[in-house]
Amino acid sequence: PHLCGDRYSLSRRTASFRGMTLSTTREHLLQATVRGIMRPMADMLHECESAVALKPTVFVTGGGATAAAAAYKQDVLFEGKRFEVRKNSSLIGLAKLACE
């Protein structure tokens, strides 16, 4: 669902919803959107795993790093991975670099 562009491509992307019925809810549309946004992330993780052995824990950061988002990724999109939220990791990393 590239509703406003795509960070993985320079080409202009578009999106649409198909297969909706009168029983389709807002929650269904939101779930489809979230899955569509996370699918390239899942594909990239699987591609990395084919070249490098990855640890089972994935640390999530940034504005979308919430316990609920991590649980959704773990339960729905990334089977076999454990997601752990790390708050302020950019600031912590900069502080560690500054102290070296």
Image (cartoon, grey):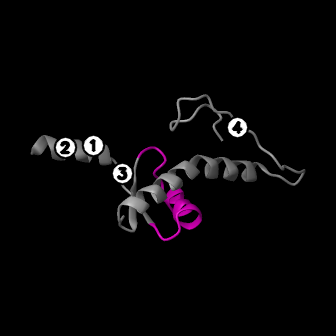
Mark 3 residue element = loop
Q: Earlier in the sequence, mark 2 or mark 3?
A: 3
**Mark 4 residue type:** Ala
Q: Residues within 10 Å of mark 1 (few under 14, many from 20)?
A: few
Q: Which mark is residue 95?
A: 2
Q: Is residue 40 left or right of residue 94?
A: right
Residue 88 part of the magenta segment = no
Which of pointers 2 and 4 indicates the residue nearer the eye? Answer: 4
State the image coordinates of residue 50 (x, y, percent, origin top left).
Answer: 43, 62
**Mark 2 residue type:** Ala
Q: Earlier in the sequence, mark 2 or mark 4?
A: 4
Q: Residues within 10 Å of mark 3 (few under 14, many from 20)?
A: some
Mark 4 residue element = loop
**Mark 3 residue type:** Lys
Q: Which mark is residue 91?
A: 1
**Mark 1 residue type:** Leu
